[in-house]
Amino acid sequence: MTDTPVIQLSDLSIGFTGRAGYTLPVLRNIDLTVRPGESIGLVGESGSGKSTVALAAMGYLKRGLRVLNGSATFEGHDMFALNRKELESLRGGHLALIPQNSGQSLTPTLRIGAQLTEALRLHSRLDPAQFPARVLELLGQVRLPDPQAIIRRFPHELSGGQQQRVAIAMALAGEPRALLLDEPTTGLDVTTQAHILELLRDLARETGMAMVYVSHDLGAIARVCDRVVVMYAGEVVMEGSARQVLTAPTHPYARGLLASIPKLSDPHLPMALGGRPPAPGGAGDGCAFVDRCALASDLCRTTRPMLAPGPGGAPVRCHHADRADTLPMTSTGDHAARAGVGTAPVLSLQDLEIRYSKPGILDRLRGLQDTRPATVDDITITIAKGETLGLVGESGSGKSTILKTIAGLLPPAGGEIRFDGDAPLPRSVEQRGPDHLRRIQLIFQNPDDSLNPRHTIAEILEQPLKLYFGLSGTALQDRCVEILERVRLGGHYLDRLPSQLSGGEKQRVAVARAFAANPDLVLCDEVTSALDVSVQAAVLELLNDLKAAQGTTYVFVSHDLAVVRALSDRVAVLYQGRLCEIGPSAEVYALPSHPYTEVLLGAVLEPDPDTAPKLTADDVIELSPPAKGCPFQRRCPRKIGAKCDTDTPPWQTRDDGHAIRCHIPLDDLHRQQQADS
């Protein structure tokens, strides 16, 4: 295997011309070398330039940007000197990209099988007769259940995590020599994410594929990357081995990022990094991090630090790197205690059943019933005012489906939903009155689903304020600015379009839009998945503050189990649309009783390259539950026999409300878990 760089950025600066005619840099003097088989992680807050670096490696710049100096090469090709045809010959095949938003790479009108076949036709050297088998192999590699069924589906018939896995499969179809990954595991559950990262790491080592991995998830970075580059305000502030950067960082910013990460072992909300990065061109002559740094001095304000070897040998851009170890890397104290919970129920789900599939017209004429298992079945949960209920489970377990049904976007097939003690909620959003529409707000996993691309941020925020509160003029504008400030954006965002924002910034606008309606119940569908760890911590604090001040109730869906623990009072665990465990967060995390919950928590990634998840190599996610017996029977590591195959498991409930649905007695489960540990 050659040591010649696959990707090389040399003194690359990229910027745009502002309204006043000044050139404003987005990237400043970036040097990056990626060799065959090497995986480089790019980390930093939204807007730090990570995605711009990855796209520059492909020779792509967003509209309005231009190269100020430097170069970007791929296997010796100057990417900004190639014409369109030459770029197309490299992109997708030799140099592939997995985008943050899987929907951007999937055609909504084509079935999954056709899209993967097209990728093979364009970017592989296989004989067309080999395409069908290779399509199924790719889907199996990314752990999609029942590939034969998946190839016949359209993108909208898959969950967000399943769509993301299809996008990963498409990128791998051409067996690229370099893979650029922009938040590739954002929508994936913990078990799938861990297995996908193992696949990517093995491919890099076995085939020599180089990877540039952009992510807010420092646990994922620790698992797959050899080196880590920390970016802030468009420049590199630290780089080194994954172990150097993630366990002993010598830059205050890197330590602040680590302190912002919620931990499975810590029930408290994480500590948000104060302040915000400077706007492009606003770093001045000194250190770009000076206004947020606890070690800042007069020297930091007047002189830009150089990237030079620091304590431990890793290059760092800081005048006071020798004192960085005095700053914390974990949250300190109970700075954001969880808000209290009331006793009055605000939301009640009773025997809720949801089906996506419907009998065809011929089946209905014949009087035939759909005998396939329901997508979601037998969900009974009561949520108190001011409570946060976390819904967790793998992709396709029905979490988002339940939220959409509560919001009225998907009618239930059975059962009922009651809100604030009233009569059952109307089944569809069209049947609900303005008061219910205001009081129940849904924040989507993908902010593009709720942000009109043709409206400015001001117009997006003004709509609920005008509709529900009749605001206008100065009061309207002031309220928009206030709402943006609460999600750590400023008034200068009001004139921007969604396309001018990073993925994390768009998600913050979506959060702001929901809270503009002053809701009583907020349905959060992966609302922090696109946020960097510092902004994520700030949004969690915001949600908790609103809950304390207004008694806001949340149903919080997330694949990040540490985030769920930090915010939630109770946790409900779903498998294949069936509830298998529910109880107080502290109890569920301290003593996960159901075998499935045990599997989920064992797959959580820690930001430490020396800590590996607990995975089962032959564990395969299913597309639907078995017709009878325990839904988890085929994957259960503690299966006890034929009873699991044939009998529906009973509920076992403790005095504190912690309940599991399993045939194994609770005491026996706990003894087995203690023996294994």
Image: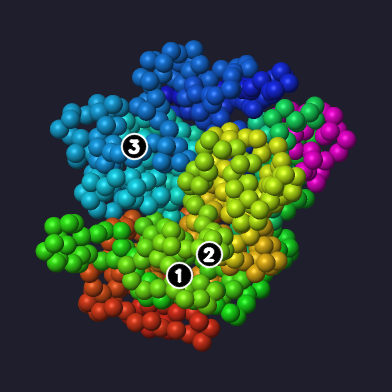
Q: Where 330 sits versus 62, above or below?
A: below
The stretch in magenta equals 287-310
Taking the spot 41% from the left edge, 27% from the top edge, the residue there is 95
Residue designated by label 3: 107
Q: Nearer the viewer, mark 3 or mark 2?
A: 2
What residue sits 53% from the left and 83% below the top?
Answer: 656
Task: Tell how many labels.
Answer: 3
Judged left or right of residue 54, residue 471 is right
The amino acid beneath tag 2 is: His
**Residue type pointed to by label 1:** Leu
**Residue 177 seen anywhere in this rendered image of the structure:** no
Q: Is residue 299 shown in magenta?
A: yes
> x%, y% of residue 646?
22, 77
CA gap, disc 1 and disc 3: 35 Å
Amino acid of disc 3: Thr
Q: Which residue is mark 2?
A: 436
User: In this rendering, does residue 454 appear at all?
Assistant: yes
Location of mark 1 (residue): 425
Q: Are marks 1 and 2 in contact (CB under 8 Å)?
A: yes
The relative height of residue 182 versus residue 88 in the rendered view (above or below) is below
Q: Position of residue 573 (x, y in %)?
A: 44, 68
Answer with mark 3 or mark 2, whichever residue precedes in sequence: 3
Q: Residue at x 69, y 23 (%)?
A: 18
> Looking at the image, is mark 1 or mark 3 earlier in the sequence?
3
Residue 510 shown in magenta: no
